[in-house]
Image (cartoon, grey):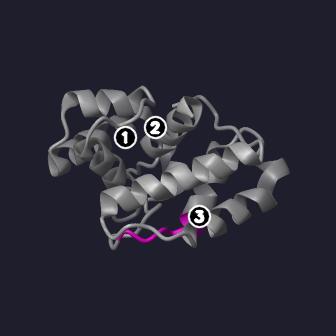
């Protein structure tokens, strides 16, 4: 389970874009932008340096602020919308971008995004993002999809 959490957090860290309004999955490859967005989300959510550090190390959140930090970054990257609902199209793009074997698993990636977008998620955006991310990571592992370890 800790491997799933670590992979999920890696995905969350990579859900950052150059600008809030024009976020695209392909923009998430710059480490400087990841750190910049993490600091913006830290300020917005009241997260601590420790919360940011845990996220950057791909370790599980230890508090609500840590979950909200990840939700903020997912919103900036449009993996979830401002209303907390999943954005399947951007999720698929991100999974393809971040997956080691995306070409071989394209159908599975689409299935995962659709499956996880359809689950019952809490109204709270922080909890919703956490649930969506856990679903994605769980299904990625079931399908043998691994994330690239670069950022």
Judged by depth in the image, the label closer to the viewer, 3 or 2, is 3
Q: What residue appears at the point 67 percent right and 51 percent down from the top-left corner?
A: 139
Q: Dots 3 and 2: beta carbons under 8 Å? A: no
| Residue at the disc numbered 1 | 33
Residue 126 on image: x %, y %: 32, 56
Q: What residue appears at the point 80 percent right and 61 percent down from the top-left corner?
A: 107
Q: Dots 1 and 2: beta carbons under 8 Å? A: yes
| Residue at the disc numbered 3 | 116
**Quick one: label 3, few (<14), some, or many (20+) residues within 10 Å?**
many
Q: What residue appears at the point 51 percent right and 37 percent down from the top-left corner?
A: 5
Q: Secondary structure at mark 1?
A: helix
Q: Is-magenta flag for residue 87?
A: yes
For the question of whether residue 105 can be seen, the reply is yes
Q: CA distance from mark 1 to mark 2?
A: 5 Å
Q: Secondary structure at mark 2?
A: loop
**In the image: residue 128, left or right of residue 118:** left
Image quarter where the N terminus lies is: top right
Q: Is residue 37 above or below residue 112?
A: above
In magenta, the rendered stretch is 84-90
Residue 25 on image: x %, y %: 53, 54
Residue 94 on image: x %, y %: 58, 53
Q: Is residue 117 above or below residue 79?
A: below
For the question of whether residue 19 can be seen, the reply is no
Q: CA distance from mark 3 to mark 1?
A: 27 Å
Q: Is-magenta flag for residue 108?
A: no
* 68, 20: nearer the viewer: 68
């Amino acid at each position: 389970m800790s491997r799933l959490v670590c992979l999920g957090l890696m995905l969350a860290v990579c859900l950052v874009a150059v600008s809030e309004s024009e976020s695209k999955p392909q923009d998430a490859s710059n480490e400087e932008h990841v750190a910049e967005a993490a600091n913006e989300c830290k300020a917005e959510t009241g997260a601590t340096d420790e919360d940011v550090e845990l996220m950057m190390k791909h370790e599980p959140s230890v508090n609500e602020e840590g979950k909200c930090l990840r939700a903020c970054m997912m919103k900036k990257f449009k993996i979830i919308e401002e209303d907390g609902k999943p954005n399947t199209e951007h999720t698929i793009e991100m999974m393809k971008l971040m997956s080691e074997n995306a070409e071989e698993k394209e159908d599975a990636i689409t299935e995962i995004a659709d499956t996880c977008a359809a689950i019952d998620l809490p109204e709270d955006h922080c909890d919703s993002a956490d649930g969506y991310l856990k679903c994605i990571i769980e299904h990625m592992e079931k399908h043998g999809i691994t994330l690239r370890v670069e950022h």
